[in-house]
Amino acid sequence: MTRRAWLVATVSAAILYGASYQQFRFFTLADPGGATDAVHYVAMAKGERPSEPEIRHYRWVTPAAASLVMPITRQLVVDDDELGLRLAFYLVNLAFSLVACLALFWLLQAMGFSTALGLLGVCAFASSRITVLVTGTPLVDAGYFCAVALLVCLTVQRRVTPLAALMPVLILLKATTIPFLLLPLLTPLRHRWVIWVGLLAAAASFVSSGQILSNIYGDSDASYVGTLVEHAVALPHTASRLFTWSGVYDLQNGFSLWLPLAVAGAWLNARHRTRDVPLVVVATVPIAFGFALLSGNFGRMFFAAFPAVISFALIAVEHVMTGPAPADATPV
């Protein structure tokens, strides 16, 4: 690793640990608050079968990784079995969030932002209440956000081989990564056969994983189609909530004041063409917004738009600091 990479990794780890440790320390499975999914993922890590049809058991990578770390963490806290289990999840999610920070930084560098602004963007991501939540609790979204950061970063950098190689793995972190896997098709990378091989391998990985899990869980299986239909039925009510103060608050929950700053940055960029923001970065907004509407979880699901929101927010910061400058990033 270069000195700059070590710097970013150190700063990211410091912020992630400092911001998420309290969330980890005071979280309990008996009272999970807004992280009720954590109870299911902990049960998966312990090898327990769900008592009812569950879509969550398809998101097995994070619980499986935590179960591998558990023998070590339980040696560290021999007198508290639950703490050892939660610590295993914390270490796995901390690693996912750290990789996401590094990928976000290299994405911002590829777009032409300075090292200082890149670090500011990493700080915005690492200190977000959503990042704190998914890092400090036994959830799988830290891996999901890591997948989004890697897919967008590698696409903008046009790193075809690692991008294709990671696709079959990233799709298993959470099914919501699927639209992000298609982002390279918005770029000239769609003409590279390696990308199509990666997508086919991802599809095979996804189907194979589903078949294996269906055989394991049997009657406890829940289909993606059934889940989508269930969410679609509730879509009118969910959409109407978006026009309430509660809905607006939830939508900006993960970004806080970075979201209005991003709106200002988008307007400034449209007026002054400060930077050529790649289409794959912008596309994270409608994808994340669509998932937010479909799921009803505005804050956590819309946070997947962080590559675009943070990029546009940094444009606003850069404009205030230096004034409009010619674009120096290659559009993708």
Image: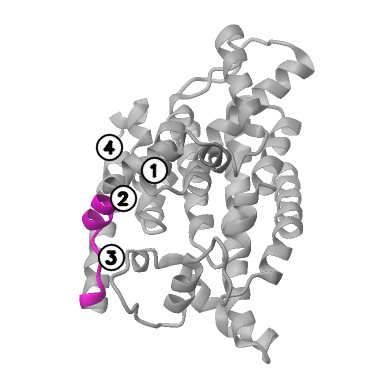
User: Cβ–Cβ below 8 Å for labels 2 and 1?
Assistant: yes
1 or 3: tag closer to the N-terminus: 3
Q: Amino acid at mark 4?
A: Trp
Pointer 1 residue: 238
> Which residue type does callout 1 highlight?
Thr
Q: Is residue 29 above or below residue 300?
A: below
The C terminus lies in quadrant: top left
Q: Mark 4 sits on what residue?
A: 193
- Label 2: which secondary element: helix
In space, the residues marked 2 and 1 are separated at their CA atoms by 9 Å
> What is the crowding at mark 4: few (fewer than 14 residues within 10 Å), some, or many (at least 20)?
few
Please name the residue that numbered disc 2 is placed on: 231
Mark with earlier residue (2, 1): 2
In the image, residue 50 above or below residue 290: below
Callout 4 touching callout 3 (CB < 8 Å) = no
Element type at mark 3: helix
Between marks 1 and 3 in the image, the one whose residue lies nearer the viewer: 1
Can see residue 150? yes
Q: Residue at x 31, y 50 (%)?
A: 231
Comparing 134 with 8, the one in front is: 134
Which amino acid type is marked by label 3? Answer: Ser
Q: Earlier in the sequence, mark 2 or mark 3?
A: 3
The percent position of residue 202, horizontal first and vertical second, equals 30, 52
Residue at position x 76%, y 32% in the image: 116
Please report the bounds of the magenta region as a residue range.
219-230
Magenta segment includes 90: no
Give the spatial CA distance, label 1 vs label 4. 40 Å
* CA distance for labels 4 and 2: 35 Å
Q: Which mark is residue 209?
A: 3
Q: CA distance from mark 2 to mark 3?
A: 23 Å
Q: Horizontal and vertical percent for residue 191?
A: 29, 29
